[in-house]
Image: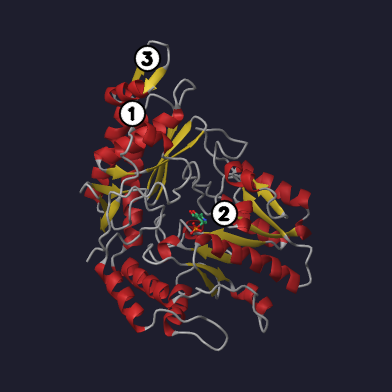
Amino acid sequence: MVNQYPTQLTAKTRVRHYAADFRKLDELFPGKYPRMFVHGEGTDLIDSDGQRVLDAGNHLGVCVVGHGRGDIADAVAAQIRGLEFVSLEAGASHPYVAALGEELAGRVPVDNPIFSFTSSGSEANEVAMKVARDYHRRRGESGRFKIMSRYGSYHGSSYGATTATSIPAFREPFQPLVPGFVSLPQPFAGFCGSCSFGEDCVGHCIEETAAIIEQEGPHTIAAILAEPVSIPGAVKVPHNDYWPRLRELCDRYGILLIADEVVTGFGRTGTLFACEHWGVRPDILTMAKGLTSGYVPMGAAAVSGRVQEAFEGSPLVHVNTYAGHPVASIAALTTLKIIDEEGLVANAAAREPELRLRLEEIGAQVPWPARASVIGLLGSLEISLPDDVDAERFRALLWHESYEQGVVVRVTRAAQIVSVFFYPPLVITSDRLQEGLDHLAAAVRRVTTTTLMDDGRVEVGPSAEIQASAELA
Ligand code: PLP
């Protein structure tokens, strides 16, 4: 049964929505946004006008097993009726979190792991960074406090995670940030400072990483925090040598390696965890999103037995009321069961070539430089717009046109580069994937049509929208 609330309330006035994304949509299509979603079914979302769209981007990488699943709803409802909450306060626990720890231990690429459960990915990264600093302090190396992360990476919204997020727009308004953070190059052409957009990554970034470690002093560095595949701006699949060489550098200098698998975990990239693509075992691995497929919020940090030894008899001082929440534990256990039983990791791997081929074809239709990048069911298409195109308008139109066609994508912008992200739930069939990509292709075709205006400006988009915005202006 769906809970009924009026859908004509706009939610705009009293609810903060992400960033400023929708100002342009509002300007171009007054009163139409935000869309109010009232139902989810498998790969799809249904809005209050009854329009059905493929969710290839609204869920922010959370949705693995699909929307509206009765099996998870039943398990979660039964747990709420039986025991909705008990904390992990000294002397107490519950079988659901214990079972989840066991299930995850057999799956994460971390040696003999111990889990700290959290309520989000940001908090999982906070735990990982605290563990890293305290680990070295307990071993008599309190001078090792620096956390290294890469330019263009995103690690979350809490203060430590914001500091590790090496993207100026996310950091600058909140200065001064947490001391002791250092930025490293990102292993992807156009983001690393060595290779540029359109080239292949040749691994300069790892040499530069070694040089920065030497320059900072290895004895001052606690950990390197990195996503196996970083997402902001593009799906930045690294050079195949990158992760094994990063692991080697960490081993050589006594630095802990933290893999942030908040978005890549639970099958998204075609392996259960993305580190498995390169056979790398981090010292700490953080997860969230796909852990419960979004049914109940939950995150976790998996800490290796070797690191955990430093905490024997005197645990990490980090309290979270909701750690190991029984309802979230049941949502996670049921999600893991579905991932196994429905072969979702193999499905993500099988769909990868289809997604890549179509995104490359769509990119080839664009009249400007475009680059597709795909791993598993995680894809992006970056479009490099000429200076005379209003990139914010292009971005809003692309989102709108995709929606009108029948697919929700995520569209971001950095200066004149607009990036479309396409990452449907892992339960998607080949046919539904093709339909979603047909919708995207149609939207891209419409939005990349250009009109030279009387005043010399180049306008993008279908003529009806150009007309409407000219009237508004
Ligand atoms: N790390 C990565 C790689 C992410 O993509 C995100 C969220 O998008 C986070 C951390 C933060 O997770 P949360 O929003 O659950 O705090």
Q: Nearer the viewer, mark 3 or mark 2?
A: 3
Mark 2 is on which residue type? Trp
Mark 1 is on which residue type? Val
Identify residue for label 3: 452
Q: Is 123 on the left-hand or right-hand side of 379?
A: right
Tell me which residue sits at (42%, 74%) in the image. 329
Q: Residue furthest bottom?
A: 91
- The reply to whether residue 138 is in sight is yes
- Separation of disc 1 and disc 3 at Cα? 14 Å
Identify residue for label 1: 447
Quadrant position of the C terminus in the picture:
top left
Q: Badge 1: how crowded within 10 Å, few (<14), some, or many (20+)?
A: many
Above or below, 31 against 288 in this view is: above
Tell me which residue sits at (67%, 45%) in the image. 207
Above or below, 155 against 151 in this view is: below
Tell me which residue sits at (37%, 53%) in the image. 59
Q: Is 191 on the left-hand or right-hand side of 358?
A: right
- In the rendered image, residue 433, in percent from the top left (x then y), is placed at 27, 47
Q: Badge 3: how crowded within 10 Å, few (<14), some, or many (20+)?
A: few
Quadrant position of the N terminus in the picture:
bottom left
- Separation of disc 3 and disc 2 at Cα? 47 Å
- In the rendered image, residue 79, in percent from the top left (x then y), is placed at 35, 79
Mark 3 is on which residue type? Leu
Sequence-wise, which precedes: disc 3 or disc 2?
Answer: 2
- In the rendered image, residue 186, in percent from the top left (x then y), is placed at 59, 45
Identify residue for label 2: 243
Callout 1: SS: helix
- In the rendered image, residue 258, in percent from the top left (x then y), is placed at 59, 61
Q: Badge 2: how crowded within 10 Å, few (<14), some, or many (20+)?
A: many
